[in-house]
Image (cartoon, rainbow, N blue to C red):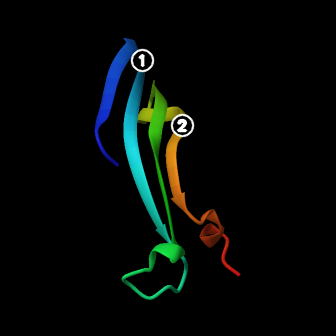
Amino acid sequence: LHTSRAWATGPDAAEGLTHVTAHHVGYGVPLPAPETATYTVTGTYQDVFARTPAGWRIWRRTLTLLTTAGDPAILRPG
């Protein structure tokens, strides 16, 4: 996760953005993993927060993908 920003939208509500880069490596692949056994995505999480009696919670999270690289099939082993 990279830079996060949150702002109030009401007394018990807020919104936020978090930038993310997620590097995935196939299950059981020896490290350092070859590029053919990896899958990388970048994107932005858009969050809506709500204050509850137990504290602040993420009420809704949406991921917008910006880039992908590699083979997404490594996410489904076997």
Residue 41: mark in rendering:
none
Q: Please state which amino acid type lies under the numbered disc 1.
A: Asp
Q: Where is residue 13 in the image (x, y as percent from the top left)?
A: 44, 19
Residue at the (38%, 37%) spot, across then down: 18
Left or right: residue 70 compared with residue 16: right
Q: Which of 48 and 55 is in front in this view?
A: 48
Using the image, determine if residue 28 lies above or below residue 14.
below
Q: Which of marks 2 and 1 is nearer the N terminus?
A: 1
- The residue that disc 1 covers is 12
Q: Please report the residue visible at 55 percent of the width from the left and 35 percent of the height from the top.
A: 62
Compared to residue 65, the image places residue 12 above or below, namely: above
Q: In which quarter of the image is residue 57?
A: top left
Residue at the right extreme? 78
Q: Assign a secondary structure to mark 2.
A: strand
Residue closest to the eye, 26 or 62: 26
The circle on residue 64 is 2
Amino acid at circle 2: Thr
Badge 2: residue crowd in 10 Å (few <14, some 14–19, many ≥20): few
- Quarter holding the C terminus is bottom right
Residue 73 screen position, x and y as percent: 66, 68
At 52% from the left and 86% from the top, the residue drawn is 28
Q: Distance between the residues labelled 2 and 1?
A: 25 Å
Residue 67 pos. (x, y %): 49, 46
